[in-house]
């Protein structure tokens, strides 16, 4: 099963990732590649925990990522 992963640059160095379709599923790493490896493991572990708790496992949701420009001068 495929999941969309959002990766962010951490202010203190490295990267962190979240999985929008699996609330609470996060991971981190020093590089994007390492972060992707770690988040894959996090997804697998998260799904196992959901199955053990007899909770629903959500499939990947479609969503749009966009940018909005706002005027910060009030």
Image (cartoon, rainbow, N blue to C red):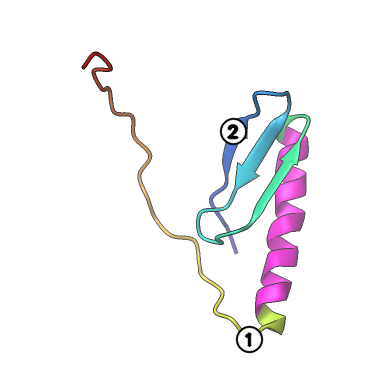
Question: Which residue is drawn at the image coordinates 70% and 43% (left, top)?
Answer: 36
Residue 18: % across, % down: 59, 48
| Residue 52 versus residue 64 in the image, above or below | below
Residue 29: % across, % down: 77, 36
Single out the residue that lies furthest toward the left.
74
Q: Which residue is mark 1?
A: 54
Q: Which residue is mark 2?
A: 8
The residue lying toward the viewer, choosing from 5 and 24, is 24
Q: CA distance from mark 2 to mark 1?
A: 31 Å
Question: Which residue is drawn at the image coordinates 33% and 29% (left, top)?
Answer: 67
User: Residue 54: which quarter of the image?
Assistant: bottom right
35 on left or right of 59? right
Most common SS among magenta residues: helix
Residue 1: % across, % down: 60, 64
**Helix, strand or loop for disc 2:** strand
Among numbered discs 2 and 1, the one appearing first in the sequence: 2
| Residue 26 versus residue 22 in the image, above or below | above
The residue lying toward the viewer, choosing from 72 and 58, is 72
The residue lying toward the viewer, choosing from 71 and 69, is 71
User: Residue 25: which quarter of the image?
Assistant: bottom right
Residue 49: % across, % down: 71, 74
Q: Which residues are magenta?
A: 33-50
């Amino acid at each position: 099963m495929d999941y969309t992963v959002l990766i962010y640059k951490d202010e203190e160095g490295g990267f962190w990732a979240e999985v929008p379709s699996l609330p609470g599923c996060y991971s981190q790493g020093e590089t994007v590649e390492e972060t992707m490896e770690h988040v894959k493991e996090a997804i697998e572990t998260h799904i196992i925990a959901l199955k053990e708790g007899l909770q629903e496992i959500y499939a990947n949701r479609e969503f749009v990522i966009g940018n909005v420009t706002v005027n910060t001068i009030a």
